[in-house]
Image (cartoon, rainbow, N blue to C red):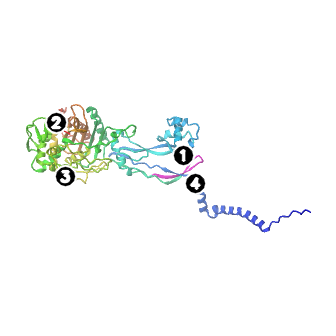
Amino acid sequence: MSRAPRKTVIAPWRFYLVVIALLALPTLLVGRVLSLQVLDTDRGRSFLQNQGDLRSVRNAEIPAYRGVISDRRGEPLAVSTPVISLWTDPAILAGVEDLSALAGALETTPSALRERLDNYAGKRFIYLQRHLVPVAARDILALRIPGVYGKREYRRFYPAGEVVGQLVGFTNTDGAGITGLELAYDEWLKGVPGQKQYIKDLHGDAVRDIGVLEPARPGKDLRLSIDLRLQYLHHQELQRAMALTGASAGTIVTLDSHTGEVLAMVNHPVYNPNSRRGITPAQTRNRAMTDMYEPGSTMKAFTLVAALESGRYSTETLIDTSPGRIRVGRKVFPDPRDYGEITVSRIIEKSSQVGVTRIALDLGHQPILDVFARFGIGSMLATGFPGESAGLLPNRERWSDVEKATLAFGYGLTATPLQLAHAYSAFANDGILQPVSLLATGQPGTDGTRIISGDLAAQVLTVLQRVTEEHGTARKAQVPGYHVGGKTGTVHKVGPGGYQDNKYIALFAGIAPIEDPRFVTVVIINEPQGEAYGGGAAAAPVFSRVAQGTLRLLNVPPEVPAPAELTVAAPASHTSGAIPRAEVSG
């Protein structure tokens, strides 16, 4: 006999539990919505806002404008111009089948572009091209290629190009200073980037800016001491000198002795900071501050100071230079001819090795060293310029007579062109040496140090003026309408085996005008070719042209009527202070 199926009985409490649970779920949902949207508005909106922002809101950097570098008159030397850099997400762009339009716009081939994307597979950001002009960048962005975006940046531009390249320096692609004053004052010039928010769409493209979180703070401007008019003049004359002399390199620097400001500073070789492809370190080097040279007979002016300060000599003291040569140890120092008995002043005018050697051996090396050090030779100028050299002032326990003699006419020590100009500036500033400044000060300095008396400075100026007159070694330094002064120098270059017989450095350190001395110019011509290799033949004429242009541009009235024609005779070999070949050994 079969049994009837057993009827399943559900306990009432279970039924009600399920019903309550089903009713509770929408109640909780409605409650949560009310909590977020009505009851707890701030927290609810904040939560929803944050969740939405995580999916669509992004932060972007606002590039900061780098400060302008200008000359003393406000002419721009370095400015930042707006550009657009193109970038991409390789994962997105790699999915685009046809890259021919983009490749053509980027001046490459589709295969090369595809290979580049493959090399950066897994990356989310690479630059396609940096610093495009906005018009060109917008044309590419108008192609609407997925994964290609634009980023606003600034690019550094140098209006004066090669004329100020080695002094101002340049920045890298990211806008940071890496050479010259751009590097020295990078913290001052660079700004602080800002932050902004924007909404992106599903493709990652910016749809709308929300607002600025923090505005960008531009960098501070920098006003240099140089006068761009004088800089162009110096540059032009140096390039002319390079062509005339066949020299390998050169430098011209002009200082305002009253303020210590550098008014012009140029070098050769040059480079254009706006187009740096193929440049070499030799082109970017600011030789006026980094390169050290034996200054040769330009140091005889400071030996003269030591002689006058000793009290044993005056500018009119007679010294016998016969028979036109002098033996010191194994060395023979000759003059171009036998000058006989001449004054100390004439010794400097003629750059007599015999006369200077007799003075040096009488004084000893220490007084001469003390004067050199007092004028800043061997000491940093503290301009802050990257790579600035201090030069070298020897410090030996024992000195041979040959070393004492050669020290007096500028061998065995080194100085930069700017150091030499700085030292000569004391003669043009009544015996006061002002600190050198690459930044505009605008007024005579008050931090100067008196290193010699005003009377002594005046005596040296008188002798330096005679150097450029009829009987001196620097007649080619004369400037029509003005009295000038200075000192020539010619030194043999040092090679692997010692001094080289056929390679020279020609120097001239000059002051203008003599009646109201203010401007000091140093000219260095490295390895001039031909017979006109001396300081009087290769460097002095450059000073003449530079000084004439400087005085004219700065509205300095002429002191004397300019002659109808200035006839200048070239000095004989070695009259500008070279050590003749027979005197030089390794």
Q: Which mark is residue 54?
A: 4
> Residue 60: x percent and y percent?
51, 50
**Residue 484 included in the magenta stretch of the image:** no
Number of the front mark, 3 or 2: 2
Q: Which residue is mark 1?
A: 122
Q: Quadrant of the C terminus?
A: top left
Quadrant that contains the N terminus: bottom right
Residue extent of the magenta highlight: 193-209
Say whether residue 348 is left or right of residue 193: left
Q: Label 3, label 4: how many angstroms apart (C-alpha)?
A: 70 Å
State the CA–CA distance, disc 4 to disc 2: 83 Å
Residue furthest out toward the top: 530
How far apart, in angstroms, are the residues tagged by discs 1 and 4?
Answer: 22 Å
Label 3 or label 1, whichever comes before in sequence order = 1
First-in-chain label (1 vs 2): 1
Q: Which mark is residue 451?
A: 3
Q: Which tag is nearer the camera, tag 3 or tag 4?
A: 4
User: Which numbered disc flags the more N-terminal residue, 4 or 2?
Assistant: 4
